[in-house]
Amino acid sequence: MSARDRILAKLRAAPAQPLTSPDASITAHYASLPRTAKDKLAQEFAEKITAWHAEVHTVPRSQWVEKARAIVAEKGIATLLYAPATAHGKALAASGIAGLKAYDRPIEAWKQEMFDGIDAAITGTRGAIAETGTMILWPDADEPRLMSLVPPIHIALVDADAILPTLYDAITAQGWSKGLPTNALLVTGPSKTADIQQTLAYGAHGPKELIVLLLTGEAQ
């Protein structure tokens, strides 16, 4: 057994350490802060994440697949990666959208194709944070984190009812102290970086385009 294997074995064997809930002083502090009204959270989130160069489309929940189809055609996306075991993945598979590619095998079996042959990926989210325009992604075996990190275009589904005012609200309302995935992701806009001269560049370490489908109530 290599040193790497021994280290990984120890990590896997270690008992999980539950997170502690915020103490009373932290709870009191956040309770004293002003909160965006619930009916304004989706608007605030959309404005903030748009300011970070994301593209936002507000769409009724029953029509998001057709909007995704339109985006695929508009962007010239030839290969769209999706998670077949998820509810949104099953809806996509039934839609007949051309170029769908299921993430249905270990990455080691098709790493080269993943990095060189996928134009875009579509994922769900756990919710979002209005204050900063941030999406919460909760990767798992069905929808691995590589889906939102590798393809040049990331399409994300955000349900308006799952948008919370602040990160603190997300942590407490969603029960993060009960357990976290191996890699929880907070995504605010497409990938970006800046050199020593502070010249901002997009797409250097991940998707250069982020498209958000903001799911709302049914059309009137």
Image (tube, helix red, strand yellow):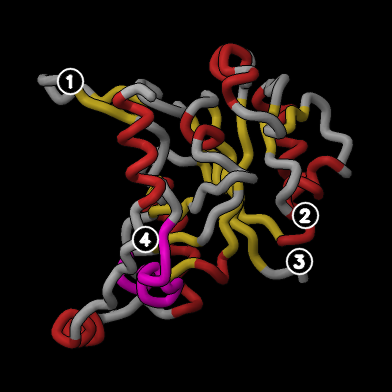
Mark found first going from the N terminus, 2 or 3: 2
59 vs 98, nearest the viewer = 98
What stretch of residues is rendered in magenta? 167-180
Name the residue: 46% across, 41% down. Answer: 54
Crowd rating for badge 4 (residues with CA inside 10 Å; few <14, some 14–19, many 20+): few
Q: Is residue 169 left or right of residue 29?
A: right
Tag 1 residue: 195
**SS at mark 2?**
helix
What x and y, as percent, mark residue 188?
38, 46
- Does residue 168 show up magenta in the picture? yes
Q: Quadrant of residue 4?
A: top left
Residue 187, compared with residue 100, is above or below; it is below
The residue tagged 3 is 219
Q: Nearer the viewer, mark 2 or mark 4?
A: 4
The answer for how far apart the CA atoms under marks 3 and 4 are is 45 Å
Q: CA distance from mark 3 to mark 1?
A: 45 Å
Identify which amino acid the numbered label 1 is placed on: Asp
Residue 187, magenta (yes or no): no
> What label does residue 63 carry, if any?
2
Kindly identify which residue carries mark 4: 16
- Say what amino acid the circle numbered 3 marks: Ala
Which of disc 4 and disc 1 is earlier in sequence?
A: 4
